[in-house]
Amino acid sequence: MMKLRRYLRGSGRVLAFVFIASIIWLLFDMAALRMSINDVNSQMLKERVIKEREIFKQQSKMSQVIKGGFGHPVQRVIPSVKQASNEAMHVHDLAENVYRGRRKGQIITDKRVDSKENDPPKKLQTEKPSKVRVDLDINEQHQLDSSKPKPKPTTKTAAKVVVANETKLQSSIQEGKIVELPKKKDDVAPKPQGNLNIGQAKTTAQFKVEKEKEPHPVKTTTKPPIKDVKSQVNRTITETQVKTAVKDEAVKAKELLQSVPKHQEKVDLKENVTVVRKEPGVHKVLSLDMTQAPRNPNAVGQFGHAVILGGEEDAEVQKRWAEGHFNVHLSDQIPLDRAIPDTRPETCKDNLVHNDLPSTSVIFCFVDEVWSTLLRSVHSVLNRSPPHLLKEIILVDDCSTRDYLKEQLDNYMAQFPKVKIVRLKERQGLIRARMAGAAVAKGEVLTFLDSHIECNVGWLEPLLERVYLDRKKVPCPVIEVISDKDMSYVLVDNFQRGIFKWPLVFGWSPLSQDYIKKHNMTIADPIRCPVMAGGLFSIDKSYFYELGAYDPGLDVWGGENMEISFKIWMCGGEIEIIPCSRVGHIFRGQNPYKFPKDRQKTVERNLARVAEVWLDEYKDLFYGHGYHHLLDKNNIDIGDLKDQIELRKKLKCKSFQWYLENVYPDADAPVVKAEGLVFNQGLRKCLTLHKGSLLFETCDLNQQSQHFNYTWLRNLQQQNVCVAPQNKEGGVGLFLCERANVRFRWNHKLGNSALGDHFITDYTGRRMCLEAAPKGDDVLLRLCDHNSAFQKWELTHYFA
Ligand code: UD2
Ligand code: MN
C-alpha cells in the first residue's frame, strides 16, 4: 500500500491520470465506432465493395495485359550465315545428289487450303533478297535421285554417301568400349556434381517457382518467340557456329571417349546386394555432325539460309503448299543434311556429360508427311546424335495414304540399320501412334520428335543427361523455328517456357527478369516448364510406363501435351526446357492431314478428357471458357475415364491446386468468376438466402447468407444451391445446381455496356434479367431494361 502511494506521488500521479484518461478515451472511441458501424453499415460496405472492386478491376486489368500479350510470338528470323568457311563446308557432290534428288518427285496433293494467315504468300519475302540456289546437275541427279523408288541400295554405298562417317565413329566408340560399360544410373553413387560442370548441373529443384510480380506476355501459338537478332546476346554469327561438319569433332569425340577410364566397377556387397560404382567419367558434350563430307556451301537453304525463289516458281510453290502447309516446293530442293547454325548458348559446348548416359530410341510418328522433311528429320538425328546413344530410330507410319511413304520409304531407309518402320493398319492418331512406337522401343529412354524437324548440333546428350541425373525429369529441347515460307532456321528468344491459358491453350511465356535474377540463371540453365509443347521430349521409358503412358482414349491430335504435362508434374516428375539442346520445327498454319472425324470436336473431346481427369475443381475454368456445350452428354461422348481416374489415384498424384501453386503460380486461375455480396443498385441492399428463400437485407460481409459465387459455369450460387428462373414467365427460385443445365446460366459482366451489371438468363428466348422487387421481398425475372437500377447488381470481388 505504501509502495502504491509512493508511486502515485508527484510525476507518478500525473502518469496514472494520463493512463486512466486514455483508457476511458479508448472505451468511448470503441463505442462510437460500433455505433457508426451500425448506422452506416450499408454505406460503408458499399464503399468497401467499390474499393475492393477497384482493386480487383486493377488485377483483372493486369490479367488482361497477359491476355493481350498473346500475340504472334515470332520476332525475326536468324540471319543466315553468309561467310561459311569453304574449308568447313566442302562440296560433297554425291551426297548433294541425294539431298537434292527429289526435285522432280511427285506427291499426292491434298488440296485443302483455307487459312488466310497461313496461306502461301503470293510473293515470298525475307530480309535477304539473295537468291541462294544451285542448279542441279542432271547426270548426278540421275545417279541418286531419291524421289524415285530405286533399287534397294547396297548398304555400303548408300551409307558412304549419306552418313559417310557414321561407321567410323561407331567403331571408334566401340574401341573405347563406352557402350559396353555397365550403366545403371540408379546405382551411381555419388553423382559428381559439386566440383564438376556436368551438363546443366544446376538442378531445377533449386529454383522454386514463385509468383511473379509483373504479368508477362504469354504467347498462345505453338510457335515460340523468335530471337530478335539485334538483341541477340553474344551471337556474332561466324563460320564457327556452322562448323557442324568437322572431322576434328569426331576425332575429338573418339579421343575423349577413349580417354575415359574404365572405372565403372561393380562391387557386389553380398549382404545387402548394393551395387556401388566409382564416380563415372564425364566428357564434353559432343558437337557431332556426322556429315564430315564437305557440303556444298551454295546449296539451296544451306546453313539454314532463307531462300527466295524466283517469281516464276510462285505457281509451283502455291500448288504444292497444301501437301504440307509449308513451302514443300522449296523444301524439296534443300539438302537433306543441310547444316544449320549452332544456336546453342556459348557455354553449352563446354558442358560435361556422363559417359554412361542411357541410350535412346527416337520415335517419329507421321501421317502423310512430306518426303523431304521426313528424311531431313531422320538425317538430322543420324548425323547429330552420338551413335552409341542412338539405339534406333522408329518411324511409325500412322496409316499414311501417300504412296511414296510405303515401299519407297522402306527402300530408302534400308540403308540405315538403325531405322525401323512400324506401320499401323488403321489411323490411330499421334497419341496412340507414339505408344505403338514406344511399345517396340529398345532404348532406355524414349525421345519423341515430330516428323518435320532438324536436330541441331549436340542436341541429344544434354537431354539424356537430365534423365540420367533424375529419371523423373522430362527434358525438352528448345524448339526453334524452321520458317514455313523460306525454310530458314530461326533462333528463338531465351528463357521461354511452355504454359497454358484457358481453355487449355498452349503458349509460350518468358521467365520474369526478377525470377532470372533471383535464381541467378544463365541462358544455358534448364527452365522449369509448366506445360510442354508436346512434340519433342525425352522420357525414361520405364517412367513413361509408370505414368501410364498417354491416355489411350485421346484421339488423333491435341491435348496430349496437357495430359502428359499435368501427369508428370502432379505425379512427381518435372518438365524442363534444356537450352543446350535445340531442335528446329516447321510450324504449320494448319494440319496438313485429314482428321477421321471433325477436327474441332476431336480436339475439344481430348481436352475435356484431360480436364475431367486432372483439373479437379478448376475444370470449370476450362468449360467456362467457351466449352459449356461439352457438359451436355448429348452433345459429346468423351468416353470412359475410369482407368485414368484410377491411375491418378494409384500414382497418388497431387491436386491441380498444388500444380498451380507450385509449378505455375502465375497462372490466371481464379476458381470462380466473382464472389461475395450481391448488391442491388436499386434497393441498395444485398441478396440474402434465408431459410430456403431469397430476400434482401442490409449488406453485411459477415453474413454467410449473403455470400454468393458467380461461377465459371455462370451460375449464381450459394454452396450447391443456384438462383435460377422458375419458369420462362417471370419467377425466380432456388434449385440444386446442375452443371449442364442452361436454366442456371446467367450472363453477367460489370461495365458500361448496355446491359452491364445485369444478370441476363440463358434460359429464355427473350432477353430476361434478374430484378429485385422494389419492396425488397422478392427476386423476379423481367424483360431486360438497361435503365432499371433494380436490374443492376454488383458482387464484391470480380476475378475475371
Ligand atoms: C504440336 C506438337 C505435336 C503435338 C500437337 C498436339 C510440337 C513441335 N508439336 O503440334 O507434337 O503434341 O501439338 O497434339 O510441339 N501425326 C500422326 N498422326 C496423326 C496426326 C499427326 O502421326 O493423326 C504426326 C504428324 O505427322 C507429326 C506429329 O504427329 O509428325 C505431330 O503432329 P503435327 O506436326 O501436326 O503437330 P503440331 O506440330 O502442329
Ligand atoms: Mn509438328
Image (tube, rainbow, N blue to C red):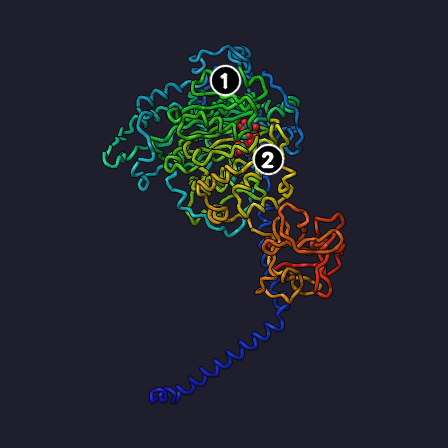
Q: Residues within 10 Å of mark 1 (few under 14, many from 20)?
A: many
Say which residue label 2 marks.
603
Q: Residues within 10 Å of mark 2 (few under 14, many from 20)?
A: some
Between 404 and 573, the residue placed more toward the observer is 573
Say which residue label 1 marks.
96
For residue 494, above or below residue 327: below
Q: Is residue 311 visible?
A: no
Residue at the extreme left of the image, as rendered: 270
Image quadrant where residue 40 sits: bottom right
Where the N terminus falls, by quadrant?
bottom left
Q: Is residue 152 visible?
A: yes
Image quadrant where residue 556 sits: top right
Q: Is residue 278 left or right of residue 92?
A: left
Q: Amino acid at mark 1?
A: Glu
Whole-percent x, y for residue 14 in the image: 43, 86
Of tags 1 and 2, the one toward the viewer is: 2
